[in-house]
Image: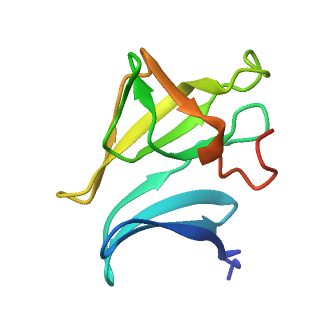
Amino acid sequence: MKDLGLKDLGATEISEGLSCISWLICGSEFMLLQDNLIVRDALKVPAHSNKSPLFIGTCDINRKETKAVIVAILDAETESAAPMLSAKMVWKIDEKKGKFVSLSTEGLRCPRSGISTVDGGL
């Protein structure tokens, strides 16, 4: 029987009762949206690193701040000194439905303050 290699990578509270919890399972990272004790959705998180860090927070779309919480893989390689980074992949968290919803990366810029990659992404 193979070991699952289960490891808790941390959690972020999205709103009252809704949390985003990251787990390492069999060498892959998964993000779960959990409403109290019920898992509402799961996302297999693409590989991320200091050059392509994982982000959770609010971003700007066409210079207007989003109200939704965003999960993104950012591009820190081509914009190493920029305070706001573009995204390679992005999802918003639909709090009412408890779902990850894929979004376009066009016009999206996210601050470095929401980077949650283990190595800091910097």
Tell me where residue 83 appears, x and y as whole percent.
67, 26
Q: Which residue is depicted at the point 40% across and 39% down?
A: 91
In this rendering, would 76 be left or right of 102?
right
In this rendering, would 31 be left or right of 65?
right
Tell me where residue 45 appears, x and y as whole percent.
55, 48
The C terminus lies in which quarter of the figure? top right
Vertical relation: 83 (above or below) 21: above
Vertical relation: 21 (above or below) 110: below
Tell me where residue 33 appears, x and y as whole percent.
37, 64
Vertical relation: 82 (above or below) 43: above
Q: Which residue is depicted at the point 44% across and 42% down?
A: 58
Task: Answer with the quarter of the image where residue 118 lies.
Answer: bottom right
The N terminus lies in which quarter of the figure? bottom right
Q: Which residue is depicted at the point 70% across and 50% down?
A: 117
88 or 116: nearer the viewer: 116
Task: Answer with the quarter of the image where residue 15 lies.
Answer: bottom left
Total labels: the figure holds 0
Q: Residue furthest left?
A: 96
Task: Answer with the quarter of the image where residue 4 lies.
Answer: bottom right
Tell me where residue 42 appears, x and y as whole percent.
40, 59
Q: Which residue is depicted at the point 66% across and 37% down?
A: 112
